[in-house]
C-alpha cells in the first residue's frame, strides 16, 4: 500500500467515547496508542493512521477531507453541520438528548415560544425547533448548562441525558419528547471515495459488533433428541452436527444470541443435551 493510500481515521482522545472506541478498534485488529498523551498512532501493518482529537472536532476534520473517517457521537455530527455522514452505528455511548426544566415548572413542551433555552448544542436544538415551527431564544454555553437556570440565565435547558442523576441533583426534570437518540458512530466525508482499506475496516467493525451480540454453544445430545435441541438453538445457517464415538450420540455447535443464553442452556438440558459449553466470540464474519 502506497503512502497516498494510507487511511486516516479520527478517534476521540478522551471522554466517554474514547475508551470504548479504542477497545473496539483493538478488538478489530488495529494497533492503538499505549500512552494517552500520544496524538497519532501509525498502524503500518494495516495501512492506517489514527489521530486522537476532541470528539466535537472530529466531524469538522472529516467533513473538510483532512481525515477520511472518524468516530464521534451522532449528536456531535449533527451539531457540527459538517460535510460528513454517518455510515455505521457502533453500539456504544448511547445517550438521549432531552429538554429539562425546574421540578414543578409549568413550561409547556408543546409551546416553547419565548422560552430561554441553555444548551451546549445550539445548532442541534435550533434544527429541532425549526422542524417544530417554534421560536425560542437559545443561550449557548460550553458545558455545565444545569447551572444556567439557577443563575437566571435560562428558563430551561437542552442537554445529553444518560442516567438523569445530574439533573435531579440540580432540581431539574426532563420533559417533552426525546430530541435525539445518540450513540457512537463511524462517519465519512460526503466527498470521500470508498477504498479497500475502508471496506476492510467496516467488515472488521461489523465482526466485532456481531461477536458482542452472540456466543458459541457446544453440546452433546442423543440422536433422538437432536431435532428438539436444534430447534431451540438453530444457529444462523443451521447448526454443525458431528457424530461422537459413543454410538447414538452427536456433537452440536451453533451460534446463538448472547442475551438469554443462560436460559437457553436450561432449555437444552431439559431437552436432553449434555456437556453444554458456552464460548465467547471475539470476532466474526457473517
Image (cartoon, rainbow, N blue to C red):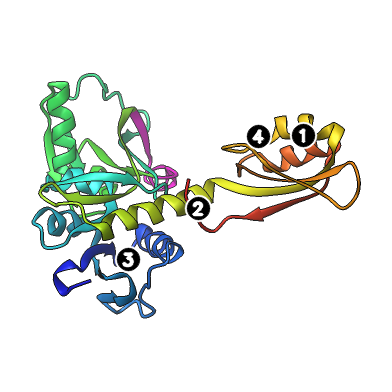
- Let me know if residue 255 is in the magenta part: no
Alpha-carbon span between mark 4 and mark 1: 8 Å
Closer to the observer: label 3 or label 4? 4
Q: Position of residue 208 (x, y in %)?
A: 46, 54
- Let me know if residue 172 is in the magenta part: yes
Residue pointed to by mark 4 = 234
Asked if disc 1 and disc 3 are in contact, CB closer than 8 Å, the reply is no
169 lies above or below 67:
above
Residue pointed to by mark 3 = 14
Secondary structure of residue under mark 3:
loop
Q: Is residue 42 left or right of residue 62?
A: right
Alpha-carbon span between mark 2 and mark 3: 28 Å
Q: Answer with mark 4 or mark 2, whichever residue precedes in sequence.
A: 4
Q: Answer with mark 2 or mark 1, whichever residue precedes in sequence.
A: 1
Q: Residues within 10 Å of mark 2 (few under 14, many from 20)?
A: some
Residue pointed to by mark 1 = 229
Query: What's the residue at 25%, 48% (across, down)?
Result: 145
Q: Answer with mark 3 or mark 4, whichever residue precedes in sequence.
A: 3
Alpha-carbon span between mark 3 and mark 4: 42 Å
Amino acid at each position: 500500500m502506497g503512502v497516498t493510500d494510507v487511511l486516516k481515521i479520527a478517534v476521540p482522545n478522551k471522554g466517554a467515547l474514547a475508551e470504548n472506541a479504542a477497545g473496539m478498534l483493538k478488538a478489530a485488529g488495529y494497533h492503538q496508542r499505549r500512552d494517552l498523551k500520544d496524538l497519532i498512532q501509525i498502524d503500518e501493518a494495516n495501512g492506517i493512521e489514527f489521530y486522537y482529537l476532541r470528539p466535537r472536532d472530529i466531524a469538522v476534520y472529516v467533513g473538510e477531507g483532512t481525515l477520511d473517517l472518524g468516530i464521534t457521537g451522532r449528536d456531535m455530527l449533527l451539531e457540527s453541520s459538517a460535510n460528513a455522514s454517518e455510515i455505521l452505528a457502533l453500539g456504544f455511548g448511547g445517550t438521549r438528548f432531552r429538554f429539562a426544566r425546574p421540578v414543578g415548572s409549568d413550561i409547556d413542551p408543546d409551546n416553547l415560544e419565548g422560552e430561554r433555552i441553555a444548551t451546549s448544542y445550539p445548532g442541534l436544538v435550533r434544527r429541532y425547533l425549526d422542524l417544530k415551527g417554534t421560536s425560542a431564544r437559545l443561550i449557548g454555553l460550553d458545558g455545565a448548562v444545569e447551572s444556567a437556570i439557577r443563575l437566571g440565565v435560562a428558563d430551561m435547558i437542552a442537554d445529553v441525558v444518560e442516567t438523569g442523576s445530574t439533573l435531579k441533583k440540580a432540581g431539574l426534570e426532563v420533559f417533552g419528547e426525546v430530541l435525539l437518540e445518540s450513540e457512537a458512530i463511524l462517519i465519512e466525508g460526503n466527498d470521500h471515495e470508498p477504498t479497500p482499506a475502508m471496506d476492510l475496516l467496516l467488515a472488521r467493525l461489523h465482526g466485532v459488533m456481531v461477536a458482542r451480540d452472540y456466543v458459541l454453544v457446544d453440546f452433546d445430545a442423543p440422536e433422538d433428541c437432536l431435532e428438539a435441541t436444534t430447534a431451540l438453538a438453530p444457529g444462523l445457517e443451521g447448526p454443525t452436527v458431528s457424530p461422537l464415538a459413543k454410538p447414538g450420540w452427536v456433537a452440536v455447535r451453533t451460534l446463538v444470541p448472547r442475551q438469554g443464553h443462560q436460559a437457553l442452556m436450561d432449555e437444552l438440558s431439559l431437552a436432553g443435551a449434555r456437556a453444554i459449553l458456552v464460548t465467547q466470540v471475539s470476532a466474526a464474519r457473517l
